Image (cartoon, rainbow, N blue to C red):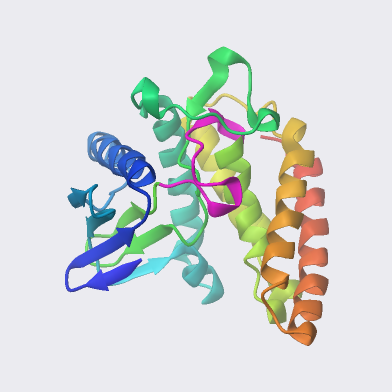
Amino acid sequence: MEFVGDIARKTGAPSLLAVEAAKTERAGQIGKSSGLFYVPKVVEFAPDAGVLDFERLRDMSTLLELAVSRDARALELAEKAGRALAVVHDQLILPDEMKEPLPAEWMDAPDENVFIHGDFGCTNLCFHAPSGQLVILDWSTAPLMGRTPTFGSRYFDILWSASYVFRAAPSKRVFNWGAEEIARALLRGYVDGFSGQKLNKLKDYRLQISQLHRKYVRSIARKRPPLSSMAYRCSQALMHARLNRFLRNCEL
């Protein structure tokens, strides 16, 4: 992402940018009608140049930044994000040609799959100070999933978001990081937004999200110097254990 004045610019394959533009515009409509969140507008999409320009918002703090600074608004933002995700899963619909399934292990029963956000992590969930709104960024699927999937089990977004809170723990704060509290707020918000229905299949996908967590950690560790990599792997081993314990004991 490149910032040019009041523009946030993304470059890449036109086919992927076209999907992101469509998801962003539809999500913006959902956010406006629900009153739960805001999505920066698409300013211009130039497919021939492979350029997608978004409205740039300033004075924002990510959910991760709020959590690190122990800001009391973090839990409120997490719960609101959960409610917003439930609405997105209920109302986001893309053209058939943009329906690209997740890997088979993340596909649910045919009538239960939904269009997904794809990277619903705590760096894409922001508090916009001037408006007091939840802002949801980056409607392209995470690179770890190949960027292309748009459709699959709602539990992918739900668990990707919850697991992100655990793996985002600063290395020096793994023993004092409120991941469980934030993840529980996200899930509680989703249940509230999902008409109070329980997340009955949450534990069914525990193995899948555990594997993704380990894959993510390996990908980050490979980019670090040996000593830093070792420290990161150790801290993440602890967070991985905490994630699994949280999911085993979670009742929502």
Residue at x 35% of width, y 44% of height: 20
In this picture, is 247 found above or below 225?
above
Residue 178, percent from left and from top: 65, 64
Residue at x 72% of width, y 84% of height: 225
Q: Residue furthest top?
A: 111
The residue lying toward the viewer, choosing from 104 and 38, is 104
Q: Residue furthest front?
A: 48
The residue lying toward the viewer, choosing from 100 and 238, is 100
Residue 145 drawn in magenta: yes
Residue at x 39% of width, y 60% of height: 126
Question: Residue 129 is drawn in which quadrant?
Answer: bottom left
The residue lying toward the viewer, choosing from 97 and 141, is 97
Left or right: where 132 falls relative to 177: left
Magenta-drawn segment: 140-155
Q: Quadrant of the N terminus?
A: bottom left
Residue 169, percent from left and from top: 65, 69
In this picture, is 101 found above or below 231?
above
Left or right: where 215 falls relative to 61: right
Q: Quadrant of the C terminus?
A: top right
Residue 8 drawn in magenta: no
